[in-house]
């Protein structure tokens, strides 16, 4: 086998596509391996399906460079393959005085990134989303869209399988680089020319068996829970709060969906375990580190984490979501506004932190080792950026 891709999420599938399109490798010489399922049912599917426009990312960062172009490429792919995209935009709504200052910072940041954005008043806002509560100003992002992660993943998987890409369910035990072979749990060893490790949370575990350059990184897992809006005001655009710039979470928002009830959420609930809803977030030996890291973040309040954690814990989850969604609208527009708990939809965020500084790592992280590439941090907006990110990674191989 010439190229092995570890991980069959959206990044792994996109890398296979780029290898073929750039004529680096024939389809039949690519093997995609996943520990759980083909294609992955992990973090790639566990999100609200928002195609981000690049508003928040640090100018010059990989996220800023790849998200805007990636969004364009993803929309083109969807149009080419008759996959529906809801081009509905996004409105950021401030609630506190500090939100206005953060809104202005986001507007400046987005402008530096080349995003299509605009500060609008209440009258302009009502033309986009009737019923929104009156505020001094809002940020409008017309290029933010909504897609179905599952539809895109399944379409891309079918395309790759049809043209000859090989798939295998198994887990990598180790890399015997001197023999250029990967050792698998169930299928012995497989020779490679090169491999790309993009196994989501597991990518960091594998990379740590090869190099000590990632020993300062560890995973702090979060669970995102959602509810559905079952009746009431028609949601015509993404409605978001102004996020806390110290945290990598965007707050509870409302997302219109294709032929489905609007999605409300997620929260970002810190968890003290390595397994979220059956999805493994790392080796069992990491559990004590997860507990320790959470406690240190809580005690030191690094990155405003304590305030966030206390806000996320709730005895009555339904009331929490109802309160956070109703605040976007005027009282008269909330007639018959009802929500419903949704146990089938949840988000997974395997947030990487720097254990030395106890800071969140917010950008994509990759490293080439012995000619192979390890993508150890590909969190949001990795789905939006997938085609640009995969091309960026594949170019490193040439």
Image: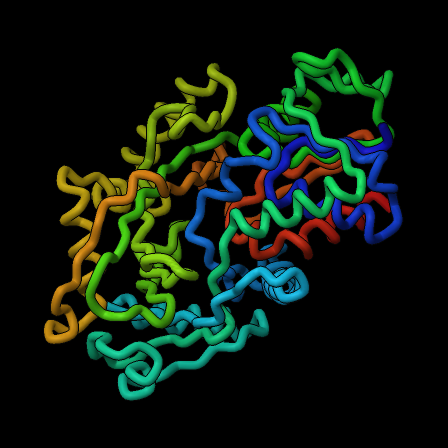
On the image, the x and y values in percent for residue 193 come to 87, 30
Horizontally, is 285 left or right of 318 in the view?
right
- In the rendering, at what x and y percent does residue 76 appear? 66, 66
Question: Residue drawn at (82%, 32%), measured in percent from left and top?
Answer: 194
Is 334 in front, or is 54?
A: 334
Image x and y of residue 293, in percent: 38, 29
Q: Position of residue 282 (x, y in %)?
A: 51, 24
- 301 over 129 or under it: above or below: above
Q: Nearer the viewer, residue 164 or 67?
A: 164
Residue 145 visible somewhere in the drawing:
yes
**Position of residue 4 in the picture relative to residue 321 (left or right):** right
Quadrant in which residue 384 is drawn: bottom right
As drawn, is 369 to the left or to the right of 278?
A: right
Q: Is residue 244 among what the camera can see?
A: no
Q: How is the image coloured?
A: rainbow
Rendered view: 104 above or below 151: below
Residue at 38% over, 37% down: 222
Rendered view: 56 above or below 396 = below
């Amino acid at each position: 086998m010439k190229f092995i891709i570890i991980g069959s999420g959206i990044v792994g599938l996109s890398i296979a596509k780029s290898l073929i399109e750039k004529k680096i490798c024939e389809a039949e010489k690519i093997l995609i391996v996943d520990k759980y399922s083909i294609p992955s049912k992990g973090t790639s599917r566990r999100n609200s399906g928002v195609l981000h426009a690049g508003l928040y990312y640090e100018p010059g960062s990989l996220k800023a460079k790849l998200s805007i172009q990636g969004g364009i490429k993803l929309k083109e792919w969807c149009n080419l393959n008759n996959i529906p995209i809801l081009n509905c935009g996004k409105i950021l709504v401030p609630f506190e005085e500090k939100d206005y200052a953060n809104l202005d910072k986001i507007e400046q940041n987005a402008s530096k990134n080349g995003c299509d954005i605009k500060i609008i008043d209440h009258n302009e806002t009502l033309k986009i989303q009737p019923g929104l509560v009156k505020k001094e100003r809002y940020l409008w992002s017309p290029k933010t869209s909504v897609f179905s992660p599952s539809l895109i993943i399944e379409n891309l998987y079918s395309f790759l399988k049809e043209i000859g890409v090989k798939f295998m369910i198994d887990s990598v035990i180790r890399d015997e680089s001197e023999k250029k072979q990967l050792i698998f749990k169930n299928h012995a060893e497989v020779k490679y020319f090169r491999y790309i490790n993009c196994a989501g949370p597991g990518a960091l575990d594998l990379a740590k068996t090869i190099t000590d350059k990632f020993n300062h990184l560890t995973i702090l897992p979060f669970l995102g829970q959602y509810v559905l809006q079952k009746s009431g005001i028609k949601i015509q655009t993404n409605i978001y709060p102004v996020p806390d710039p110290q945290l990598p979470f965007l707050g509870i928002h409302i997302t219109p969906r294709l032929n489905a009830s609007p999605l409300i959420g997620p929260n970002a609930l810190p968890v003290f375990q390595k397994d979220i809803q059956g999805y493994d977030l790392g080796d069992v030996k990491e559990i004590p580190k997860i507990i320790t890291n959470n406690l240190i973040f809580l005690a030191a309040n690094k990155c405003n984490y304590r305030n966030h954690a206390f806000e996320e814990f709730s005895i009555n989850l339904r009331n929490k979501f109802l309160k956070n969604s109703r605040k976007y609208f005027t009282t008269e527009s909330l007639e018959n506004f009802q929500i419903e708990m949704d146990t089938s939809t949840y988000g997974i965020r395997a947030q990487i932190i720097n254990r030395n500084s106890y800071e969140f790592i917010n950008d994509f992280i990759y490293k080439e080792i012995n000619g192979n590439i390890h993508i150890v941090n590909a969190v949001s907006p990795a789905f939006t950026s997938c085609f640009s990110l995969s091309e960026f990674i594949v170019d490193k191989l040439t």
